[in-house]
Image: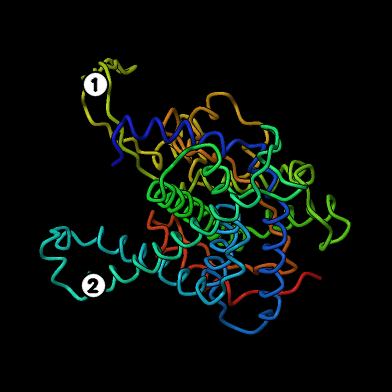
């Protein structure tokens, strides 16, 4: 865990690069890569088993790398592919280790072959990021000019990656830039893949909702291949409600830990003492009938079309307060020309995101059909 002083300083710096006005500038990147993924999925229509998870991960990683690290990732395909594989595999193994307490002992873990493999994967990831940072610094030195403060964020209409913004504004060392880049990559990929996965499963189980999403998209866009703007995305109110309802039922971070900096008296009268560690059950909060009604466990996106202030306060998929997720909005239009046919409904899937979604997406993938 990052020390309090270091975290606060870095969070303040990162907030400059992660403001909505800068994130929204990457809509064209999101739209372009979304269409590429949709086109690739189109060839699998009625072709049997399709592991959608395997399509989501590379697409989202590429999009995240392009926005965070810059277009230069596209200039190094030979290095980028091993980086992708090492990055995804490394963190898959981290989660696996977390689920196996007998591997917590670092001394014993280092004796296992998996520890050696993890070290090699980390080396691939670090080398790729370090090389990009070095090349980016050199390129920025060549382009350096007497530009104004506002022009620092854009050069001749060219989008600046978050890495460039951090280099320009932070004064970070190479090691700090690598750390922040990896944190941003992991946070963006983990949340987006999870939301996409669960949304796909839920839409396959609720065809009426899927039809409403599709009709809204058709009403907003005359052509599936037209250029998407932030104004277009703001019109997709029902799609936004679907994504929020997905995150309510399946928050990307179901549990968070916080430390009381002073005595806190709860409405029940219970006092949490200063220094006490508190486990916040976001999963339970998002399914509490007190806030969401008797149908709290049901997928009903309409609840977000007229959400109450109390419900808004109880909706914290990216945490809340000073340590909330820096990018706390999910704005994406999935303009695929396919739909997922009806899939069997489970009662209430357990909160085991990666396993549950991977299995469900393989089931959903078998039912890809073309929109008529």
Image spot of residue 310 (x, y percent): 53, 24
Image quadrant holding the C terminus, namely bottom right
Q: Residue furthest bottom?
A: 47
Residue at 63% over, 60% down: 71
- Which one is nearer the viewer's eye here, 247 or 188? 188
The residue that mark 1 highlights is 272
- Which one is nearer the viewer's eye here, 38 or 197? 38
Residue at 39% over, 53% down: 351
Q: Is residue 126 left or right of residue 13?
A: left
Relative to 197, residue 148 above or below = above
| Callout count | 2
Q: Is residue 301 left or right of residue 8?
A: right
Disc assigned to residue 116 = 2
Q: Is residue 269 left or right of residue 200?
A: left
Callout 1 secondary element: strand
Image spot of residue 186 (x, y percent): 44, 54
Image spot of residue 243 (x, y percent): 60, 48
């Amino acid at each position: 865990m990052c020390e309090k002083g270091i975290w606060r300083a870095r969070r303040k710096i990162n907030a400059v690069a992660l403001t909505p006005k800068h994130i929204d500038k990457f809509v064209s990147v999101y739209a372009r890569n979304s269409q590429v993924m949709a086109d690739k999925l189109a060839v699998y229509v009625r072709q049997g088993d399709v592991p959608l998870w395997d399509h989501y991960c590379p697409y989202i990683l590429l999009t995240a790398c392009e926005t965070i690290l810059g277009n230069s990732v596209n200039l190094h395909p030979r290095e980028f592919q091993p980086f992708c594989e090492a990055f995804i595999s490394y963190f898959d193994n981290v989660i696996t280790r977390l689920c196996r307490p007998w591997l917590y002992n670092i001394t014993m873990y280092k004796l296992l072959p998996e520890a050696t493999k993890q070290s090699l994967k980390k080396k691939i990831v670090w080398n790729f990021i370090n090389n990009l940072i070095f090349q980016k610094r050199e390129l920025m030195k060549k382009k350096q000019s007497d530009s104004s403060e506002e022009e620092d964020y854009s050069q001749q209409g060219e989008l600046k990656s978050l890495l460039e913004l951090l280099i320009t504004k932070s004064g970070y060392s190479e090691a700090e830039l690598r750390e922040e880049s990896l944190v941003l990559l992991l946070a963006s990929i983990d949340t987006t893949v999870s939301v996409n996965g669960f949304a796909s499963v839920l839409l396959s189980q609720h065809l009426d909702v899927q039809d409403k999403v599709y009709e809204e998209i058709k009403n907003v866009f005359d052509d599936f291949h037209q250029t998407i703007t932030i104004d277009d995305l703001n019109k997709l109110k029902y799609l936004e409600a679907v994504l929020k309802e997905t995150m309510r039922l399946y928050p990307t971070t179901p549990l968070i830990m916080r430390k009381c900096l002073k005595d806190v008296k709860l409405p029940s009268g219970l006092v949490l003492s200063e220094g006490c560690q508190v486990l916040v059950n976001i999963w339970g909060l998002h399914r509490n009938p007190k806030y969401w009604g008797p149908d709290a466990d049901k997928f009903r996106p309409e609840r977000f079309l007229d959400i109450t202030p109390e419900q808004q306060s109880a909706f914290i998929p990216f945490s809340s307060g000073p340590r909330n997720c820096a990018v706390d909005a999910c704005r994406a239009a999935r303009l695929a020309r396919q739909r997922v046919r009806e899939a069997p409904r489970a009662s209430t899937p357990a909160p085991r995101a990666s396993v549950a979604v991977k299995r469900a997406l393989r089931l959903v993938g078998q039912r890809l059909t073309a929109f008529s």
